[in-house]
Image (spheres, rainbow, N blue to C red):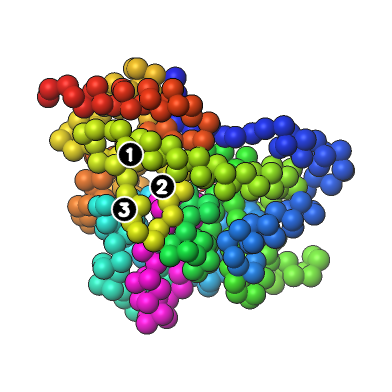
Amino acid sequence: MISIAKPQIGEEEKKAVMEVLDSGMIAQGPRVKAFEEAFAALCGVRHAVATTSGTTALHVALLAADIGSGDEVITSPFTFIASANSVLYTGARPVFIDIDPITFNLNPALIEAAITSRTKAIMPVHLFGLSCDMDPILTIAKQYGLTVIEDACQSHGARYKGQRVGSFGIGAFSLYPTKNMTSAEGGMITTDDDGIAERCRVIRQHGMRRRYYHDELGFNFRMTDIHAAIGLEQLKKLELNNEQRRANARFLSAYLKGVAIPCAPEGYEHVYHQYTVRIPGNRRDALRAYLQQNGVGCEVYYPVPVHQQSFYTGELGYQITLPEAERAALEVLSLPIHPALSIIDLDTIVARVNEFMALPY
Ligand SMILES: Cc1ncc(COP(=O)(O)O)c(C=O)c1O
């Protein structure tokens, strides 16, 4: 079976973990600091703050931006549930706007109509490794005095007009094993704002500025040095792995037939966390079953947009229709794209997809 994801863990990561274990300092310590500095440098920002997951990175970023009860955050419905749930954790309400059917990212043309007196922030989600269209988002945010919190959990190293994601607003990254880089579990907040960085560090550590003096409600969202040691090694390989993902994407895009291939508009540097195609005409589920039966792992990200999840329609009372997100949920299929694919794997993926799409239906 060609797997849909494969973490790239080598001898370097193993050695780095053993060094931490031998050092006697295994909780948050010097490796976390070094990892934060290296990650900030990657994104071209002054600060990075490590946390326990992408979810906690988003949660802390929102709290640090003073988002809370009664506030609204405009975001995408076509994402992993954590984007919207992190807003709920703060007491604020996610307001969903529809997506651009080509990029799968939120459609900036729909933001202004969703702004109310309660709107505090916009949370663009750079889905599948592709940046959102940041210029209009930043213009609107500036005009209305809104904070931009980028959910960059799937887009380590991606660029928009030459600039790295996570550097346009407050960034939040996931370091889960299926991501373009991992620390096993982990998250990272990125910001150029000294005050926001300081708040994030305080919220991460039980609201504590001075040892055992607690100024506000915080959490234990600290990363360990064991995780940071893995993350540091992974960061060194990120550019090469992203380049390999792009090369794999070029191959698939050149040879796949009958499916709509992902786009990387001019000025965007895609890092292909996922290679997501669209299969129109109600054939997606049949193709998915065919590939799985024939040795090609694949997955639907995401079968139900957030506004249609039962918790959101039920308890939270969301009753909205967002046609593009709903159509995408029926038509998308992500194919393997990870850097460990061989040319034989790539050939096999193409052959299996093309032979299915050539079948009469
Ligand atoms: C878009 C998006 N946001 C947030 C998250 C949450 O990250 P984590 O799983 O590290 O908590 C993920 C992880 O899959 C994600 O894909």
State the image coordinates of residue 102 (x, y, percent, origin top left): 27, 52
What's under tag 1, amino acid-wise?
Ser
Q: Residue at x 39, y 61 (%)?
A: 267
Q: Please state the horizontal and vertical placement of residue 8, each as a whole percent of the image.
A: 60, 34
1 or 3: tag closer to the N-terminus: 3
The picture quadrant where one finds residue 230 is top right
- Foreground of the two, 252 or 188: 252
The picture quadrant where one finds residue 351 is top left
Label 3 and label 2: CA atoms lie apart by 9 Å
| Separation (CA) of disc 1 from disc 2 | 15 Å
Disc 2, SS: helix
Contact flag, marks 3 and 2 (Cβ < 8 Å):
no
Quickly name the residue at label 3.
103
Q: Earlier in the sequence, mark 3 or mark 2?
A: 3
Q: Residue 253, which numbered label?
A: 1
| Residue 227 highlighted magenta (yes or no) | no
Please name the residue that numbered disc 2 is placed on: 128
Disc nearer the start of the sequence (1/2)? 2
Residues drawn in magenta: 127-153
